Image (tube, rainbow, N blue to C red):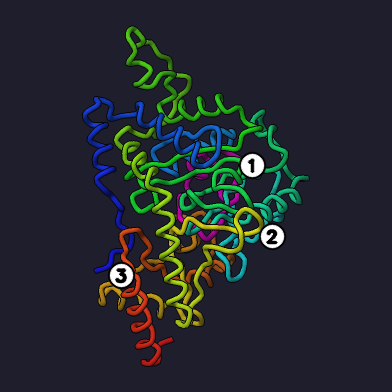
Amino acid sequence: MIPFSPPDITQDEIDEVVDALQSGWITTGPKTKQLEKELAAFVGVPRVACLGSATAALECALRLLGIGPGDEVITSAYTYTASASAICHVGAVPVLSDVVPGSYEMDYGKLPKLVTERTKAVIPVDIAGRMVDYDSLEAALQDARPRWRPSNAVQALFPRLPIVADAAHSLGARRHGLNSGQAADLTAFSFHAVKNLTTAEGGALTWRSGLLDDDEAYKDIMLMSLHGQTKDALAKDRAGAWEYDIAFPGWKCNMTDIQAALGLAQLRRYPDLLARRRDIVAQYEKGLADAGVTALRHVEGNPDEGGFSSSCHLMLVRLDGRSRDFRDELIARLAEAGVSANVHYKPLPLLTAYRDLGFDIFDFPNALAQFENEITLPLHTLLTDADVDTVIRTFKRCKHQMEDGGLR
């Protein structure tokens, strides 16, 4: 069986974790702080706050902006639940945008019509590792400026609706001269077990310098992540420094040094991991060119000018002219032949939680069309060239057998 997305763990990761275990620091400590510094340097931002997940990072970003009950936040209908559940967690109302026909990105042309005087942020989603078109997004939000009503001092720092990027997939991507983490006002990354860079579970939040005070923002996020406690374990470990306060009833979503140890080793390897992922995507694109599919583009032009370079997190493929039943049967046949495949994603209105909030999938026809014939092929750095060739050959064989049998 060729697995879908196992973690790429080497002796370097094992040694770092052992070092953390032997150091006596297994919760938030020196390795977490080191990972924050190294991630900030990699992304090209002043500060990074490591947290327990990307979902926690999104929630902290919304809380940092003072978003809560009575507010609205726009995100894409074509995403994983985390993009919208964070909105619900702070008590705000999620507003969903359909995507452009034939695309996984929300329709920026229609975005201004979704903005009301209650709208306080937009969460775009960098699906599969490709950064969204932040230039078009910002232009759309400029059109919506007449309805931008900041409701607190932090929101008033923003000249238009704040952009909080769900960049769970896109660490290491670049578009129009900016790295993922530099393009949005705030950016949430994921280091879950299936992500390009993993800490088993974990995430991080960063932000553009210039509007927010870097030190104050970091302090506030750390308070949120540890019950509102004014000293973490590292600070309290100093002799006589037990005293602390609780600034507000906070939450518990800090990253541990065991997790950060994994991340430090992964980050050292990350340029090579990215290069390998891009090589695998190139092999897929060449091998599937005659397979009757449309694959999401991961590289186009010069990313320092008008193009982009993805982190190549997922290999999204649409089966041209084929139905949902065809897609589902193909996944089953691939599994029988030893190839794991997946689907990314079921649009949110197809899920019970969002149907119960009143969303109807037929209000999002483009998202539905994208989903119905999408299949995600294995893409990870444990794949050999022979594995990729096997996936391509198996995919073509199973697909052609189904088509020859009259399935559509």
> Residue at 56% of width from left, 52% of height from top?
174
Disc 3 from disc 2: Cα separation: 42 Å
The image quarter in which residue 278 lies: bottom left
Which residue bears the numbered disc 2? 110
Q: Residue 181 lies in magenta, yes or no?
A: no
Which residue bears the numbered disc 3? 387
Residue at disc 2, secondary structure: loop
Residue 355 visible in this rendered orientation of the protein: no
Image quadrant where one finds the C terminus: bottom left
Estimate the x, y position of residue 271 in percent, counting from the top left.
Answer: 43, 50
Please say if 218 is above or below 13: above
In magenta, the rendered stretch is 69-94
Please say if 372 is above or below 67: below
Please say if 314 is above or below 117: below
| In this rendering, position of residue 332 left or right of residue 302 | left
Q: Which of marks 3 and 1 is in front?
A: 3
Instruction: Say which amino acid is labelled 1.
Output: Pro
Which residue bears the numbered disc 1? 162
Estimate the x, y position of residue 19 in percent, counting from the top left.
Answer: 25, 32
Estimate the x, y position of residue 67 in percent, counting from the top left.
Answer: 58, 37
